[in-house]
Image (spheres, coloured by chain):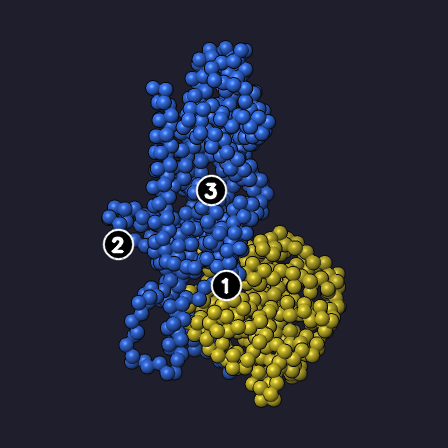
Chain colours: A yellow, B blue
Amino acid sequence: MSENLVVPTMAEMLAQGKQPEVLFWVGCAGSFDDRAKKITKAFVRILNRTNVSFAVLGTEESCTGDPAKRAGNEFLFQMQAMMNIEVLNAYEAKKIVTACPHCFNTLKNEYPELGGQYEVIHHTEFLKSLLDDGRLTIEGGQFKGKKITFHDPCYLGRANKVYEAPRDLIEKLDVELVEMKRSKANGLCCGAGGAQMFKDAEPGNKEVNVLRTEDALEVQPDIIAAGCPFCNTMLTDGIKHQEKEGQVKVMDVAELIANAQDL
Amino acid sequence: MSYLDNILFAILLIVGFGFFALNVKKIIRNINLGVDVDRKDNPKERWKNMAMIALGQSKMVKRPVAGVLHIIVYVGFIIINIELLEIIIDGLFGTHRIFASLGTVYDVLIGSFEILALLVLVAVAAFWIRRNGIRLKRFISSDLKGFPKKDANYILYFEVVLMTLFLLMNASDLHLQNVPGGFSHFHKAGSFPVSQFIAPIFNGMSNELVMLLSEVFWWLHIAGILVFMNYLYFSKHLHILLAFPNTYFANLKPQGQFDNLASVTKEVKLMMDPNADPFAAAPVDENAAPSKFGASDVQDLNWVQLLNAYTCTECGRCTSSCPANQTGKKLSPRKIMMDTRDRLEEVGKNIDANKGVFVPDNKTLLNDYITPEELWACTSCNACVEECPVNISPLSIIMDMRRYLVMEQSAAPMSLNAMMTNIENNGAPWQYNQQDRLNWKNEN
């Protein structure tokens, strides 16, 4: 049973001679990872509700090459980048929104030099702009009064200095936003970046995601908000490790907004 | 004969600055062993960074205790150097307190030097306690075993000796200024808020003896400064000079933006060009990119990364903020910088010993200093870069060495190879078909 999401592709748009307001770059996690797909859908529900004209590349989308580049495989990264740029440029993409900070950083910072010049924004920034323009209203709903802490994804925060957009959105939910002892520029990594997501950790005495989850649990939140599918996975695993999955949930900012309004 | 002092002083200065100049030349030579990278863009932003971060210490105070203590020592260092100017003029021309004619200004100057000297002593004591008493984690880690730990303490002892000599010099001077009816050339000059309390120790000594002591303190003070200056080259303390160029030449791009290897771009473009003749001989390019991808040794790094290595003062803020290090992994960003400098020094000595050419020594920065295990533990989170009070980037060195491991040696961990194969085959790090990318739309 489908929930009737309207998800046009760039190809369909082109066939109708239309250019969407924004291209939604779903990313590999958002396309394939079961947990991340929920974030993708929550974001699309908001886009549908606010009548944003958008389109995805669908089967024409491919990995941005971020994990290859961070692993040191510059060849593979640039191959991916140039193929993606060819597709994006063919559709004359101007503005790209993505719910993955890794895709965001790569598209925004590393593609221009290779011929891909776009305005790239993270979905929390995009939602914030919809809010500012009065196109999106945010209600607290089921989250009213809940204690929420936001985990800064490295590639959104430190890497690109986006700290306020996700926090502004969360505060609109009528919740108590609490900061972990390490946040914003001092935020601690979830442990997934730099291609770590795809390999075992080196020998040590703890997993990074467990350490970060401890930071979060210290402020006793009801919900840990994230803005990255990989952070989401790492923190969810961390919560399971601490056997707190009954009390604490890890949710993306887009899910918070969509679920608050029962979208 | 009366010029003997002046001549001796001039010789001391020439030797001191001469050796220092040789060391600086060697540092510049070694830094230039790195490959070129353009950091001349946006001078306005660069000057601003230098003013804020190096001169203004803006990143130091992120950790307030160490930050404030450091500012005291730093301001002390800069301000007391004004006094050095007087010492040099006095020494060369046989004058005594040449700036005394400034009157009240001079009193204020000397008075503030003294208060700063006292504050420096207090701060240095606090630093010593942090290192040797409280034993903060970042100061007792294995990175600092051996010389680095001693080096840090030597620097503190140097500061104590120099500040003490400065105060003793003033105290003995003050004692002689106060001799009823005056004594020799010791005219009244300066105010001595701190050394006035030290001066009484000279009571009961003959004026001649105090004068001799005063001269001994004066000479030891200036000689100590020159020795300290020359010690910089061998120690982690070069940051007092190199922090300025280092913050100027530091990366201005977003921290998440890693450079795109131009040599790779060329090859990838050729590969994707349907008109390229696959059998054509490779075009000979005078400015051909280096034949090596990534870095296995210091000569493969760029000169800013090598400047970074000389600038690092081993404070360990990077390592203490590193997620890998905090969870017990071997990676320590500070060690990456220390290893890079140690290897660079080794290469430099090799060049010196072999008449200006590097003779391969069967060693490299990779493996002999930095192990793949350290490199693979990095999450590329930029915490180390953010933390560094002088904008050093250990991450850029880690990334360049990973590139070498992957592109030159195909030595990535097996699971990463699987991830990369997936990207190559189906455009995602996992084994999903690209044709299934939009399936989520219709799933529940």
**Residue B240 tag number:** 3
Looking at the rendered structure, the secondary structure element under dot 2 is: loop
Q: Are marks 1 and 2 on the same chain?
A: yes
Which kind of residue does numbered mark 2 sit on?
Pro
Distance CA(mark 3)–CA(mark 1): 29 Å
Residue ID at (60%, 56%): A184
Q: Which residue is mark 1?
A: B257
Q: Is residue B21 above or below residue B198?
A: below
Instruction: Give residue B381's position: percent from left, percent from top.
Output: 51, 59
Q: Is residue B87 above or below residue B182?
A: below
Residue ID at (49%, 38%): B131
On the rendered image, what quadrant is the N terminus of chain B found in? top left
- Badge 1 vs badge 2, beta-carbon distance below 8 Å: no
Q: Earlier in the sequence, mark 3 or mark 1?
A: 3
Which kind of residue does numbered mark 1 sit on?
Gln
Q: Earlier in the sequence, mark 3 or mark 2?
A: 3
Residue ID at (43%, 32%): B225
Residue ID at (41%, 50%): B307
In which chain is the residue bearing label 2? B
Distance CA(mark 3)–CA(mark 2): 33 Å
Task: Tell which tag, 3 or 2, sits nearer the viewer.
Answer: 3
